Each structure stands twice: as structure tokens, then as C-alpha cells.
Image (cartoon, helix red, strand yellow):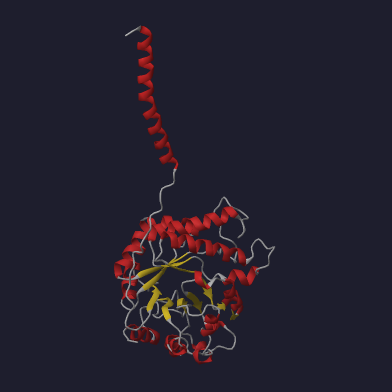
Amino acid sequence: MGKKNRKKLIVYLSILIIIPIIIVSLFASRNLTQPEEEVTLTPLDSPKIPDRGFFMGILPIPGEKQSFEESYSQAAKYSEFSQVWGRPTPFYNLAGDLSGSWGKTFVEKNIRGNGMFPLIQLSFIGQNVTLASPPEMENATLSNSAWREAYRRAVIEVVKASRPLYLSVGNEVNRWYEKYGAEENNPNGFQHFVSLYEEIYDAVKELSPETRVFCTFAREIVSENREANLDVLSMFNPDKVDLLILTSYPYVVQGINKPSDIPNNYYLVMLSYLPGKPLGFSELGWPSMDAFGGEQAQADFITQVAGRLTREQGVNLHLFGWAWLHDLDEKDYIGLIKRDGAEKLAYQVWKNISKSSK
């Protein structure tokens, strides 16, 4: 073979070797830049509805000389779920809490370890009904694209960290509506939360289709001793609200001094905005203080919410959550048990309902 032909052969062989390398490199770099497919998650909780027809839940505030472990164990005897807020924690740090030692202790051990399931709560509302924001986002508004992405991302990370069956992506959200309204030119108008909520609903369902997604509404504006404006419910697409979940402390409303003062349609009227939705309470409260009827009135309130005010009105009651197990301190009367461990009449009613059938 001549010198010239040998050079041609070497060049030809070099090309044959280099081309496959280039092709492999191109495919490798392409694969590195492509986003990974999102894994579909399944909630870790799959509770069976008890014979009574609905789930009961409570926040296990400990009594005097009682540990959190003991209070959660006590609560689980007559409850199936407990709210989860974090320590408390702002929304942008909640996923970290849930995936860390705090989450392992309170969610995995104290809640799921006692046979209950968590109701995970996020909130965008900060102190004095201002916008909770990451430190680097001062003066953000509900319409700010960076803040909206931070909130959406925080919810998704919470779902990945805790894999909940029940997820609230905003607590007592109508308090924001009551303060800021929904005017078109208002960067903090409530319509901006509604659009963000619907974006988040779709994102959560894509990631975890079985997770039940909602936001929580306050039935009363406690600080103003009145009922909330219910028109806010008409702003939501019913197809993107899995349950209608409320907080309710009706004794704060002027003219309601005993449970019998509560109109029969007090909760039913809310379902006219979201017809056919299961109804739930993340927090219910009536104090055992004498001014509101004492322990008997507190017990009657529990009975009436589970009967006259919901199921006897044809309401599909799904979650029945009381505010907390023990009184917070000597000036608090909402707990079902006093600080010293003495059970109130309401706790006996709570236990009886827990053990009842439909």
C-alpha cells in the first residue's frame, strides 16, 4: 500500500471511530438536560370510614405533666386524625420540618404510629393578615410571580415529604378576602389566591392524584364577633375543591349564646355555593365557661353539630375535628379536658359519638 493510500486509510478509520463517539456524546448530553419524569405518589394513609360515618380528629394539646407522646396516644383512642402545622413553621420551611426529625416524631410516630392520619395545613397568611413571605421577598403581594412560585413549590415539596391523604393549601383563607376584597387592580386581591389555588390543585393532582385538596374557610370572623361573608365561596371552581372544610366558633357571634341559638341551616347554607361536597371541620370550638352555658352547653354543641346542624340536614359529614384536647391554660375553656386531667361533660359526649354507629 502506498504512502498516500495509507494516509487515506488512517483518516477513514479515524472518522469511523470518532463519529460513534460524537453520537453517544450527543445522546448523553441530551439525556442530562432533559427533566426527569415526575413520579406519581400514593398517599401513605388509607383509613376506613368508621361505623359512625365520619372521621373524628383533635389537636392533642397535652395536659399538666403530660408529654406529647402521652397526649397523642390519649387522643387516638377516640380520634382518627390530627392537624399538622409544623412547629409552628412558615410555609416555605414546612417540607423541611416534615422530612426531618420533627416530622418523624410528630407525624410518623405520634400520629401515624397511633393509627391516625395527618391533615396537613399550609397558610399564606401571616401576622395581622399580612402575606407570609420568604425573607428575600419583602413587600411581595399575592400577584407577585416569584412569591406565587415559592408557595406552589412549597406545597409540592410538602406533598413529597409527607404524602398526605388530606391537604389544606390555605387556612381560613376568607379572612384575607374580608380584609383585601377582590378588586381587579388590587395586587393583594383575593382573586389572585383563587387562581393560584387552582394552579396548585392541578399540580398536586398530577403528582398525587388520590390526595384530597382543599382550603379551609372560617365560618366566623372571630375578631369582629360576626359571621363571615360567604359570597367568597362563589369565587371557587367546585371541580377543584374536594371537600368544604371549615373552622367554626359560633359562640363569638352576637346573638348566639347557647347552642340552640344556632340556626338549623348555619352550615348547610355554605353548601349552596359548593353543592354536593362532603363537609368537614378542621376546628370546632365552644367554651365550657359559665357565660356560654358551662360544660353542658359545650357538650350540647358537639351533639348538635354532629346531628341537628349537619347530618339531620342531609349533609355528608366527613371530618369532625375539635380544636384541642386539653385547655391551653387556666384562662382557656375550649379543651375537652381540663389542664389537671379532669374530663368535662363534652369529653364523655365525644367518646360516646366516637363509639357510635350511623
Left or right: residue 197 compared with residue 43: right
Question: In which quadrant of the rendered view does residue 7 lie?
Answer: top left
Q: Which residue ends up furthest to the top in the rendered image? A: 3
Question: Which one is in front, 122 or 290?
Answer: 122
Which quadrant holds the N terminus?
top left
- Asked whether residue 87 appears in the rendered view, the answer is no
* Quadrant housing residue 184: bottom right
- Residue 62: x and y, percent? 38, 72
Q: Residue at x 46, y 62 (%)?
A: 88
Residue 205 in view (yes/no): yes
Number of numbered callouts drawn? 0
On screen, 59 above or below 26? below
Residue 297, position as x, y percentages in the image: 46, 89
Pick whichever, 206 or 76, lies toward us.
206
Quarter containing the C terminus: bottom left
Residue 354, x across and y down, in percent:
34, 82
Tell me if 168 is positioned left or right of 252 in this view. left
Residue at (32%, 67%) from the top-left corner?
A: 112
Residue extending furthest toward the bottom: 260
Q: In terms of depth relative to the viewer, which is nearer, 315 or 129?
A: 315
Residue 46: give x, y in percent of width and height. 33, 69
